[in-house]
Amino acid sequence: MDPAYAALQAEVFALRIELRAVQDRQAIADLIAAYGPAVDRGDSRGAAALWAADGSYDLGDFGNARGHDEIAALFDADLHQGLIRDGAAHMLGPPRIAIDGDAAVAVCYSAVARWTGEAFELYRVAANRWTLRREAQGWRVTGRANRLLDGTAEARALLAEAHRPPD
Amino acid sequence: MDPAYAALQAEVFALRIELRAVQDRQAIADLIAAYGPAVDRGDSRGAAALWAADGSYDLGDFGNARGHDEIAALFDADLHQGLIRDGAAHMLGPPRIAIDGDAAVAVCYSAVARWTGEAFELYRVAANRWTLRREAQGWRVTGRANRLLDGTAEARALLAEAHRPPD
Amino acid sequence: MDPAYAALQAEVFALRIELRAVQDRQAIADLIAAYGPAVDRGDSRGAAALWAADGSYDLGDFGNARGHDEIAALFDADLHQGLIRDGAAHMLGPPRIAIDGDAAVAVCYSAVARWTGEAFELYRVAANRWTLRREAQGWRVTGRANRLLDGTAEARALLAEAHRPPD
């Protein structure tokens, strides 16, 4: 093979690998950005579908749901339905993302605002650690842990750097 | 043509298409991230220039402005000028973006914080649906709808998945 | 050289340049997204390491720290340690980024939420202007200015468009 051609081929191969990493980061950020709009418009199945079939949502004292049915049931529960009827915004901040092949970890804050009928209040502010997996259809959540940032060490531990394993 | 060369050419073409999609998503996120800083520093014309010449900003009961002059007038109005004089932050969250050729839809939350003189309060929390168009100078907003998340079905409908038409 | 080959080589070169710009934007957004989790989990050295060795953090009346030791000392101070013991979230919004070679400017909002023991409150809402430099290990912060959005012209000036020099 022509050596110049081989060098070009190697560069194209490198571009493909690096572009995939960039696309992965965008896809994961987009997946997380889909969570709030899904739960706040009442699309519990759509929100649960962001998870893998065996994915879990760990809310600490509020429970630990596994699989689409259990996760959708969290959003269908009275507490959550009351929130969105009154007016709520599940706002997720920009995630810090680390990708390792077909697995990823993302860390972000969530702030839930609630309309009291007279004003908006900050109802929940939490640390979130997401683990994700590349599946045939794209990235899916394998685990999400959410803890109120109320001074507990457990919440702070979720904020460990995305490229390190959880403390 | 050398078959190996043709394969390389096809891959380079694919990379170009995919890179453009990645750039488009970044450009749209950047455009939306420019909104808050523009209005909060009092640059009404700069904020309006994020819209296309025929673009609209639909605020429901607060009006529906079309074109740069009407949109800039929203930001020049007493209510808004009072807000930024007292201290305000128009914070837009990370958007969920869907692109189809030269058109795009983005969905995000907005939270306006206001300094009361003693503390910051959450003044407005809203759902936002943006439609955008690729123009010669880059992406511009063709429409933005904003509704307070105070429990109305109209606000929730704006949160429909970005890749689906509005309900 | 074969003219078709030369054209392909030029396109591959263009893709490399453009991909690097996309990667730079992601890396800068990721760097800024690492700030909150680092300070809120109490990793003062990790937070300071986001800055270049000669970088500064200008907090106006709250001081102007330069270098890793002084910046880490800000986070180790009683005020900050009390905040994270009680429960705090340093939430940074999506930045507006402009890159010029090995230098960049990013503008974003920050909102610090605090747990009072009974509720979350918006403790600080500020404008942030970051300057960054590409170093051997990646992008690092050379300067961050942070001002409360309490109506002062100084805070509004920080919101100047990222691609313009500060007012």
Image (spheres, coloured by chain):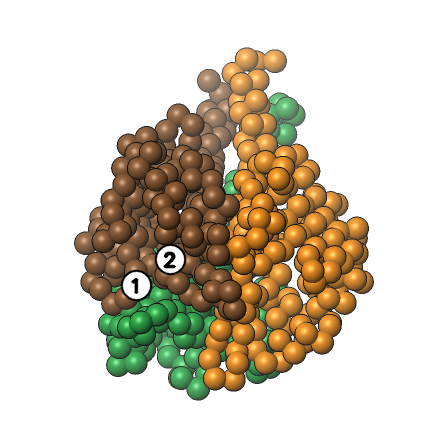
Chain colours: A orange, B green, C brown
The subunit carrying tag 1 is: C
Whether residue A18 is situated above or below residue C58 in the rendered picture? above
Residue C109: numbered disc: 2
**Tag 2: residue type?**
Tyr
Helix, strand or loop at mark 1: loop
What x and y, as percent, mark residue A109? 53, 55
Residue C88: numbered disc: none
**Tag 1: residue type?**
Leu
Q: Tell whether label 2 touches label 1 (CB within 8 Å).
A: yes
Crowdedness of circle 2 by 10 Å Cα count: few (<14), some, many (20+)? many
What x and y, as percent, mark residue C158? 26, 55
For marks 1 and 2 on the same chain, the one whose residue lies earlier in the sequence: 2
Q: Quadrant of the N terminus of chain B?
A: top right
Residue nearest the viewer, comparing A120 with A98: A120
Q: Quadrant of the C terminus of chain B?
A: bottom right
| Residue tagged 1 | C149
Whether residue A162 is situated above or below residue C116 in the rendered picture? above
